[in-house]
């Protein structure tokens, strides 16, 4: 009796089950764009936990957010870095806000615009009572620059929880990525900062772990 057809059938069924499991695990939640705020009075009501995302211009914030919520164009990726002047808010299942902060550190932007951004972001970070954590995104190839470290130390001084993410991991080899993670982790540790999470918007590396961290932060807030 030939068992090959039976074996192939079992293999097909197993593959189907695995695919369904992965699909369910990655099932996108109900998420939608809420508003763009250019002034503090335009912020949405502080009626649910909120997670903010910050990083240098062109670091991949929008790509990271899109990967987390499994939406290709929810957070728009600008072709001209440094042009986002607002804080963009998104609603997740009517139980969580995500806030995409303007990118910093783009030299081509005028000093006046930088000052406007700074005032807006500082007002947001200091006046948003439902802000539970800030995901600070750093390019794994570059490591934390002066502006990144300034932000991280500022958040620590105000006792705002941070989650440090090293993005664009797919841009370097595995060996190089490990070297970069070790070096950056040491640099952060010397400054008394948390260890980073490695992430790739392209491959999805680190996305499930970051989702779990965000979910846990939101759940603790809801249970409090």
Image (cartoon, helix red, strand yellow):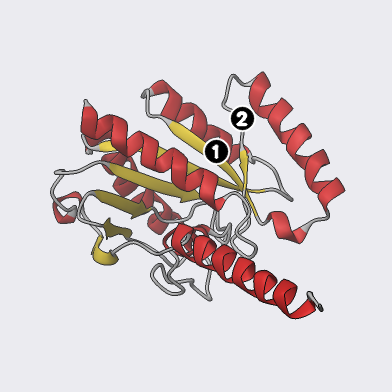
Residue situated in front as seen by the camera: 11 or 65 = 11
- Write the residue at 55% across / 58% down: 106
Which residue extends farthest front? 1
Callout 2 crowding tier (Cα within 10 Å): few <14, some 14–19, many ≥20? some
Looking at the rendering, in which quadrant would you find the N terminus? bottom right
Label 2 to label 1: alpha-carbon separation: 7 Å
Residue 36: percent from the left, percent from the top? 26, 63
Mark before the other along the chain sequence, 2 or 1: 1
Residue 45 is left or right of residue 142, and the answer is left
SS class, disc 1: strand
Looking at the image, do the residues carrying marks 2 and 1 touch, with CB atoms under 8 Å apart? yes
Residue under label 2: 195
Residue 151: percent from the left, percent from the top? 49, 36
SS class, disc 2: loop
Res 86 → quadrant: bottom left
- Write the residue at 74% across / 38% down: 181
Q: Which mark is residue 196?
A: none
Q: Which mark is residue 164?
A: 1
Residue situated in front as seen by the camera: 71 or 15 = 15
Callout 1 crowding tier (Cα within 10 Å): few <14, some 14–19, many ≥20? many
- Write the residue at 77% across / 33% down: 182
Looking at the rendering, in which quadrant would you find the C terminus? top left
Residue 23: percent from the left, percent from the top? 49, 66
Residue 11 is left or right of residue 176, and the answer is left
């Amino acid at each position: 009796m030939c068992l090959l057809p039976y074996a192939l059938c079992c293999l097909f069924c197993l593959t189907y089950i695995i695919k369904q499991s992965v699909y369910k695990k990655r099932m996108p939640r109900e998420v939608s764009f809420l508003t763009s705020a250019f002034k503090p009075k335009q912020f949405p009501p502080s009626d649910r936990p909120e997670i903010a995302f910050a990083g240098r211009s062109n670091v991949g914030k929008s790509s990271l957010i899109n990967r987390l919520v499994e939406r290709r164009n929810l957070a728009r990726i600008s072709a001209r870095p440094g042009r986002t002047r607002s804080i963009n808010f998104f609603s997740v299942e009517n139980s969580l806000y995500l806030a995409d902060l303007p990118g910093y550190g783009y030299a081509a932007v005028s000093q006046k615009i930088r000052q406007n951004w700074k005032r807006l972001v500082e007002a947001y970070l200091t006046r948003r009572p439902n802000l539970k954590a800030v995901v600070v995104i750093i390019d794994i190839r570059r490591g934390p620059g002066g502006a990144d470290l300034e932000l991280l130390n500022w958040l620590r001084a105000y006792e705002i929880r941070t989650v440090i993410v090293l993005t664009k991991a797919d841009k370097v080899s595995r060996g190089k990525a490990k070297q970069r993670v070790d070096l950056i982790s040491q640099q952060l540790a010397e400054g008394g900062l948390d260890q980073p999470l490695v992430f790739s918007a392209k491959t999805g590396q680190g996305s499930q772990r970051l989702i779990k961290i965000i979910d846990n932060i939101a759940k603790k807030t809801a249970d409090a």
